[in-house]
Image: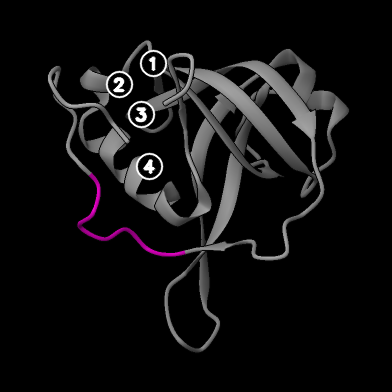
Amino acid sequence: TQNGIIYIEPENYTNMLKAVYENLDSYVGKEVSCSGYVYRCIDFSENQFVIARDMSISSTSNTLIVGFLCESKEIQKYEENSWVEIVGKIEKGNYHGEIPILKIKKIKKIERPKEDLVPPPDNTYIPPSSSIALF
């Protein structure tokens, strides 16, 4: 963490995603920064998008889209599949059940990284507690 912001790197993206989903109450109010591409579903509101990454799920190049649901009025300026870097605050939201939603504070367009896949979650992430720093 820097300046109270949790920086989510590609190599631990899915570990953080899993940790936040499994321990949402521990993360509400925390700020995170990450990058990904803009992905929208048909039933999203006009301010909603997923900051998405493609997770490799097999050696045969199969991937699965993973990411955090985000909300920002500014997202309409960004095209589907364009790459962005965001800073957002984790809040509880609802999308087919209770899930974390990132309320975007900063968003900027970036170039697509050379290595754009993220690995599946493993057991290296540390479950949050008040006495343990997250990274």
Helix or strand or loop: what does disc 4 sit on? helix
Q: What separation in Å lies between label 4 and label 1 (alpha carbons)? A: 13 Å
Q: Nearer the viewer, mark 4 or mark 1?
A: 1
Lateral position of residue 94 relative to residue 23, left or right: right
Q: Amino acid at mark 1?
A: Lys
Helix or strand or loop: what does disc 1 sit on? loop
Quarter placement of the N terminus: top left
Please tell me which of labels 2 and 3 falls first in the chain.
2
Q: Which residue is mark 2?
A: 27
- In the displayed structure, 50 sits above or below 53; it is above
Q: Which range is magenta?
A: 119-125
Q: Amino acid at mark 4?
A: Leu
Q: Which residue is mark 3?
A: 99
Q: Are marks 2 and 4 in contact (CB under 8 Å)?
A: no
Please tell me which of labels 1 and 3 falls first in the chain.
1
How dense is the environment of label 1, judged by Cα within 10 Å: few (below 14), some, or many (20 and up)?
Answer: some
Helix or strand or loop: what does disc 2 sit on? helix
How dense is the environment of label 3, judged by Cα within 10 Å: few (below 14), some, or many (20 and up)?
Answer: some
Magenta segment includes 124: yes
Viewer-closest of 10 and 55: 10
Q: What separation in Å lies between label 2 and label 3 (alpha carbons)? A: 12 Å
Q: Which residue is mark 1?
A: 30
Please tell me which of labels 2 and 4 falls first in the chain.
4
Q: Amino acid at mark 2?
A: Tyr
- In the displayed structure, 66 sits above or below 20; it is below
Magenta segment includes 70: no
Please tell me which of labels 4 and 1 falls first in the chain.
4
Write the residue at 22% across / 18% down: 25
